[in-house]
Image (tube, rainbow, N blue to C red):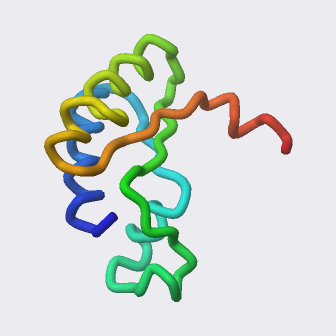
Amino acid sequence: MELQALTNLVSAVCAAAKGRRIILFGSSSLFASFPDGDPVEIGAAVTIDADFFIEPDDFDVRAALGAELGEDNAYHLTHGYYGDFVDLRLANAGF
């Protein structure tokens, strides 16, 4: 995903999840720290999705975000990239 696409997606997530803390994680999060970096050099996978935790976590909010901005939905089909809204409990799963 290019930085501008990620910026657009983050803006859409923020607008749809007002009042919630939005945490971008995974390889797409590296673009925020290294916007001019080569994805291969910074260890970022080139993908068409970005991973998000929404806090406080709420299944219904994640489902609504996924329906609006997730894979195979209108945003994805229009823009070619999408958000993946992950259960915050995964952060504490202790892999």
Residue 63 pos. (x, y %):
42, 18
Residue 7, picture quadrant: bottom left
Q: Quadrant of the rendered structure where residue 89 is?
A: top right
Nearer the observer, 9 or 76: 76
Identify the residue at image location x=45%, y=79%.
Answer: 39
Residue 6 vertical placement versus 42 (above, below): above
Above or below residue 36? Residue 23 is: above
The number of numbered discs placed on residues in the rendered structure image is 0
- The quadrant the N terminus occupies is bottom left
The x and y percentages for residue 28 are 45, 61
Which residue is found at the position 40% from the left and 85% from the top? 37
The spot of residue 35 in percent (x, y) is 34, 77
On-image quarter of the C terminus: top right
Residue at the image position 52 percent from the left and 82 percent from the top: 42
Taking the view exactly as shown, the residue that stands out farthest to the left is: 78
- 10 above or below 66? below
Asked whether 15 or 9 is in front, the reply is 9
- Residue located at (26% from left, 26% from top): 68
Outermost residue toward the right? 94
Percent x, y of residue 18: 27, 27
